[in-house]
Amino acid sequence: MRFLFLEPFFGGSHKDFAQGLVSHSRHRIDLVTLPARFWKWRMRGAALYFVKKIPSLKDYQGLITTDLMSLSDLKSLWRRFPLPSLVYFHENQLTYPLAPGERMDFQFGFTDITSALAADQVLFNSHTHFNAFFEKLPDFLNLMPEYRPKWVIDEIRNKADVLYPGCRFPAQEKWARPTPPANLPPLIIWNHRWEFDKNPKDFFDALDAVLERGLDFRLALLGENFQMVPKEFIAAKERYQNRVVWYGYEASGEKYREWLLQGTIVISTAKQENFGISVIEAIRYGCIPLLPHRLSYPEIIPKAFHDDFLYQDQNELVEKLCFFILNYPKFKIKCQNLSAAMSRFAWENLIDRYDEILEKLVMKPE
């Protein structure tokens, strides 16, 4: 079968997902994208771009989009719209945290709702995300002063499901992690977006607390930054100086994996995380995870590892980080077992389910 995939924000997890699906599916999927910037304008206007970019739909059996575009706008602009459609929700604007000083624009939440209503199939990237969306949806609708369309809750839920995004590592391969020279301190990895919702302040505060206790580390600040560099990262480059062994986005997938293979500890302090591709990649390549006991992390980390690798608050983050810096060799076997558990997220273990959903989408009776 042949599908059209429209991605209005081709970066980060959106890019990983789109490229992974296209390269692993047994179906032909033609990918048309817009750059990963100005997400609000993408939600408002991407449909106007794609409707002219795609001259004809006659060669396709189905359409795939993600949440940063109005599918309802696109379908109305195309007028005669013959394709069954799937929307994949990486995030949603009902539950996404607001940036400091920002007020909610309710229109983005309604765009999520109308896109889900316009789709034939809706997929969320985790059970955490699915549950958060449907828990928030009634409250969001109650913000309307009257004529609240409560019917949309069941309408969307009845065609919604959960399917994890695949990750870009082999399911079976094992890696030989390099042994760092004995005189080098452990390498801490940050491989998340450089944005407010990943909460870099708490991350750097924890590193400061480690230094105050006389412990040392090296630091690799990886991850994408789509617009301005946050002030916390600018200050960190100056504050940690020679401890920073990498600063900025690593575009080479091979070199990025090399950093993860060298890494000792990967930390998240996120306020928003619906899945966590970057964390799963780091764990798969052998890093010790130190993650908050919230968001999607208790879902993606097997329960047997929660006590070791999840923390409850900032104090526990600091205590566990200090402990790992001093004792990380003792966790080699546990990290190997946790790495093996992450193989369930490899594309090769998930792609059959995606292809089945796409086939059912096309075969679904009118």
Image: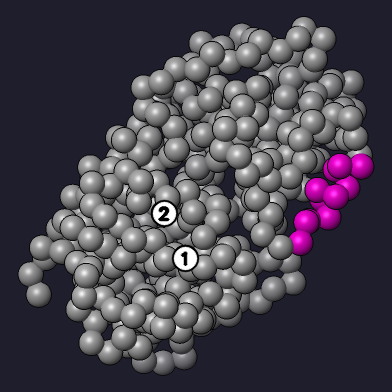
Write down the residue under mark 1.
33
Seen at 40% across and 25% down, the residue is 341
Q: Quadrant of the C terminus?
A: bottom left
Residue 128 visible to an observer of this rendering: no
Up the image or down, 343 lies above or below 312; here it is: above
Q: Main secondary structure of the magenta part?
A: helix
Question: Which colour scheme appears in the figure?
Answer: one colour
Seen at 31% across and 35% down, the residue is 348
Write down the residue under mark 2.
18
Amino acid on which disc 1 is placed: Thr
Q: Are marks 2 and 1 in contact (CB under 8 Å)?
A: yes
- The quarter holding residue 149 reads bottom left
- Residue 263 lies, in percent from the top left, at 65, 25
Residue at the left extreme, as displayed: 365
Which is nearer the N-term, disc 2 or disc 1? 2
Q: Is residue 237 located in the magenta-colored stretch of the structure?
A: yes
Up the image or down, 313 lies above or below 179; here it is: below
The answer for how far apart the CA atoms under marks 2 and 1 are is: 10 Å
